[in-house]
Amino acid sequence: MNTTTKPRDLIHVFEAAGLGIAPFTFAGEVDNGKVTTTCDYCGTGIRYEEIIRDSKGKTFKVGCECVRKTADHHMISLMAEAEKSRKARQKAEAEAAKLQAQRDKNGGQTDGEIQAAKRADEEAQRQEALKAEKEAIRAESLKTNRAVFDLLMPWAISHQTWRQEQWNDLARTYGGAPRILPAGEYFDPSTFLGSVWEQLESKPLMSLSYRQREALTGAAVKGLKRVRKVRCLTKGAAIYKEVQAILLPEDSPGK
């Protein structure tokens, strides 16, 4: 008859306590919400039941500290994953409860939603103010820069008509769809005259420094020369001096 027994230090602590037969596995965690039971190993009151299953399928409950004291790394790692999931769930539940409390207090909206709506309203008001300011500046620019617009307008309308014809010719040649240029798009915005036109619509001449007016004059003359070249115009060179006289008169401040 074999009466050999395991050395005491080789017996699992749970087996030594009579809780089951090794090997043991971690079977999950139960959250009771508060301390309602005790650890089957040490008798301490516990809220979280770490469920352990032995080799025969028997289960029992212990506290997390007793699991850690076993030095069973596999069991401890499984319990750690369960604790991590539980804490994430508790955090999500707490956040949901917090948001629900805010909705109850605010009539259906969270504090964050109210702040976001407030910021959106403030941004909308800011954009409206910027739009109104821009329109006011444009109206003032159109008024104070009228002499330049009156001088360039015939060229602008003529050039827009020519651009429209060129576009339609390309559309007919390559099968593209006809396109109607916007009413105010007299010049391609990327060209010299397009840039000049945009600046004249956005700033009164009196608000520009001498250097800015000098640059604007140079761009306008270059743009007009390109239009004459593209359109093969033999007349109209006098417009260069007329534009320069308006944009950069002899008595310009800062000259």
Image: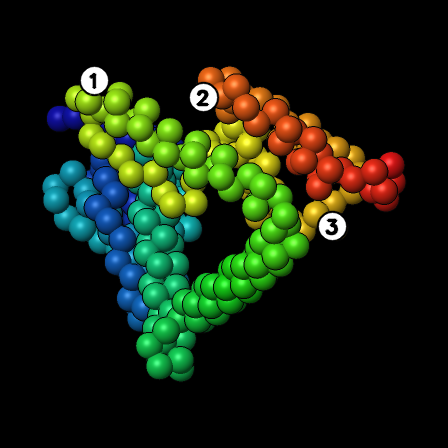
Report helix, strand or loop for mark 2: helix
- Total number of numbered labels? 3
The residue shown at (40%, 80%) is 106
Of residues 44 and 228, the one nearer the viewer is 228
Residue identified by numbered label 1: 173
Viewer-side residue, 57 vs 7: 57
Per the image, label 1 sits on a secondary structure element best described as helix
Towards the viewer: 23 or 124: 124
Observer-side mark, 1 or 2, equals 2
Dot label at residue 115: none
* Left or right of 97 on screen, residue 128: right
Q: In this view, does 151 lie above or below 62?
A: above
**Pointer 3: what residue?**
207
User: 223 and 138: which one is in front?
Assistant: 223
**Which x, y percent locates residue 213?**
73, 38
C-alpha span from label 2 to label 3: 33 Å
Return the disc, 1 or 2, that comes first in the chain's sequence: 1
Q: How crowded is mark 3: few (under 14 residues within 10 Å), some or many (20 or more)?
A: few
Q: Which amino acid does label 3 sit on?
A: Ser
Which residue in the structure is indicated by mark 2? 231
**Image-based side of 247 in relation to 179, left or right:** right
Q: What residue type is labelled 1?
A: Thr
Q: Who comes first in sequence, dot 3 or dot 1?
A: 1
Q: Residue at x 47, y 17 (%)?
A: 232
Q: Which residue is drawn at 42% across and 51% down?
A: 65
- Inspect the image, locate mark 2, and give the three-letter code of the amino acid beneath it: Arg
How far apart marks 1 and 2 lie (CA) works out to 20 Å
Residue 253 occupies quadrant: top right
What residue is drawn where x is 43% and y is 67%? 117
